[in-house]
Image (cartoon, helix red, strand yellow):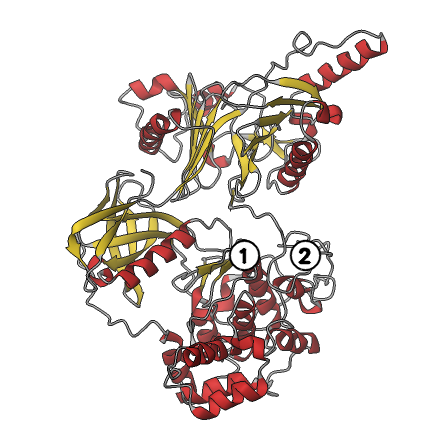
Amino acid sequence: MGALQRRSAFFDLVKFYSSMSHGNAPELHPQIVDPFHNVTYRPGKLLGKGGFAYVYEFHDVTSDASYACKITPRSALQKKKYYDKFVTEVTIHRGLVHPNICRVLNVFKDQMNYYIILEKCNGGTLTDLIRRRKHLTETEARFFSKRILNALWYLHDLYIIHRDIKTSNIFLMGDFDVKVGDFGLAVKCESPEELHWTMCGTPNFLPSEVIYSHIMKRKANGRGPDPNLDEECVNLCHQLLPAYSGQGHSFSADMWSFGCLVFSMIYGRPPFEAADIKTTYKRIVRCDYSFPGSIAVSDDLKNFIKGLLTQDPRKRFTVKNCLDHAWLNPSKYFIPESLPPKIITEPYEVPPLCSASPTRNIQLTINMNKTTGATDGRFIAATPQAIGGTDHMGTPGTANFYKTQNMIPTAKSATGSSRASTAMPMQNVGAAQNIVNKYGINEAEYPQIDPPCYIMSWVDYSNRYGFAYQISNGSIGVIFNDESAAILSPNALIVDYSPSLLDAAFDRALFEEGTTILSEKKFKLLSFFRDYLENRSIVPIPAADRPKEDEELKRVVEQERMNNQEVDFKRLTKGLPLPQLFLKKWKLYDDGTLCLLFNTKVFQVNFADHSKVVVAHRSVTFMSEKREIYTYPSEYLKDDRFTFKELRRRVDRARKYYEIIKAARPVDSLAQYRYNKDSTKKSASGSSTRQLGQGGE
């Protein structure tokens, strides 16, 4: 490793809150118990460390699932400012649900430490890959850039600035999928216009406005700037930067850092790297970088990087500008959907038959409204607080409903798609095959049954409007913030509406006449949520697999109107009960656990690890994080020989949540952080030390 690379590795670890002293590694017991969720972990090897935190590999002793655990000793957070910083990180990170953001699965504490359970990224970091390869190709950089931009779109849409985007904070899964992590410096804004002054980040990836704002803030307070910002650097800021860039930083700061990251992927080093931090800062202020001639790159890439490394934050590329740019245009350049394992040691080779065609390159981003090109990093006025984007399950009767892991044989249909075989009843499949599934259950002795309806996907817009969901029969429902509710039938023909879920008195109308029972605003919202959930579904429900009762009901209504008869929807149900199946209550905990209670008392829990359990009157259903579905009669739980430990454990946890949600109101979106004040302990500053409450209480 050369001198510059060694310095880069050193600078990469420097953060401006690193004046905190590093303590010793946390004391760990052989087994660590999360008492609320009743999970026991076995600590493994040390994966990394930084600041006050240490990251260890953790194993669930029951399932042997492997996680990463970020451990912070309680002794390190005695000062209020450190504790508050930790709480901010946890509060922001645990509320994020996106396929390209490292997921917080759980947070708990014991007498010694705080524990943040994270999904484990087995592929290391983008820094690791670049160091092994020296630099990446443009095709590989496009693959990673698309996914990082997806995460930034999501964060900025939630008014969150990451403030430490760099290669070492881009974690890779085993298949090289991207997970943005480390939210230790992140901040959540109240509005898109909000500005921040704290000088934080990593020197090589720091934008010029962060430096200038720090200088101006210190000057206003009668203090000198950071020692690494010498007089020459201060003068350069005044001479070269627009005055407003010294008045705080915002979402555009992430875009500058992203530009440095793209440059690092292509050239193997950050664009402003220098022998010392003082020189690095001056190069940043001057925007002093160049494209080395030793690596041939496209003009589109150079233009892309220049648009990001623009000194004026108001003129800098936004996420939307990046995704619309020619360099990421799949019609012009091939963008792979995945990368092979061999890219660890050798460049990715574009398959010879792959052209730069949009039909060959599946877009990873949602279509963006061309008229909403805000320059502040915000694009959508109303923001989903949490999206069940990875929570789609197979639908009964569709190709993805029964997986091979469930040992349900499949047959090819006439169209070539694999469907659950109807040659024999499901209960008899195990008996005929004498199959033992992956959880050790003999399907001959304990045959499965059909699952009940469940929530396939959902979106939380309760910061503005309400909570929307799609049921596995195709119905779309909304619980509005005023505790009214609407439910749209599987084929979007009939709508039921109740002004109060507490009374649950529903009126009914044809969907095309929905404004006769809903306000125009709620009707538009229901239509929006219908399109949103239908279009974003990973496993769409084919029309042939949806119940047809609403089609028959609409036909009868139209026939009666032709005969000049008065339509009475309470009389004309035609197999579609009034009201339809609907969600009665929902509760989203701050650890990501989502509880859902139907009007039929069927209870569903979506756990933070993406597994689910549905407890119905006569059945229990377990859905693994891989979308495998197992449904058994409830009476099996009375049989000690039924050793489906994971199902039993999930059902036990669901029962605890059920007791809580029974007493909750219909709208109870987010169980906020709770603190227990410990008046007997004082921090060094003399203020009482708040203890972080356990999630899910």
Estimate the x, y position of residue 502 in percent, counting from the top left: 49, 21
Amino acid type, residue under disc 2 in the picture: Asn
Asked whether residue 288 is in view, the answer is no
Residue at 52% in and 42% down:
388
Asked whether residue 321 is in view, the answer is yes
Estimate the x, y position of residue 450 in percent, counting from the top left: 50, 22
Tell me if mark 1 has few (under 14), some (14-19) or many (20+) residues whose alpha carbon lies within 10 angstroms of its own: few
Amino acid type, residue under disc 1 in the picture: Ser
Position of 37 with respect to 583 (left or right) is left
Position of 595 with respect to 289 (left or right) is left
113 to 539, vertically: above or below: below
Residue at 54% in and 60% down:
152
Residue 68, quarter of the rendered image:
bottom left
Task: Give the labeled residue for mark 2.
Answer: 361
Estimate the x, y position of residue 567 in percent, counting from the top left: 75, 10
Position of 203 with respect to 310 (left or right) is left
Task: Say which quadrant the N terminus sits in.
Answer: bottom left
> Disc 1 vs disc 2: Cβ atoms closer than 8 Å?
no
Residue at 66% in and 31% down:
413
Residue 658, quarter of the rendered image:
top left
Numbered badge on residue 191: 1
418 to 590, vertically: above or below: above
614 to 137, vertically: above or below: above
- SS for callout 1: loop
Tell me if mark 2 has few (under 14), some (14-19) or many (20+) residues whose alpha carbon lies within 10 angstroms of its own: some
Count of numbered tags = 2
* Residues at marks 1 and 2, CA–CA distance in whole angstroms: 35 Å
Task: Say which quadrant the C terminus sits in.
Answer: top left
Numbered badge on residue 521: none
- SS for callout 2: loop
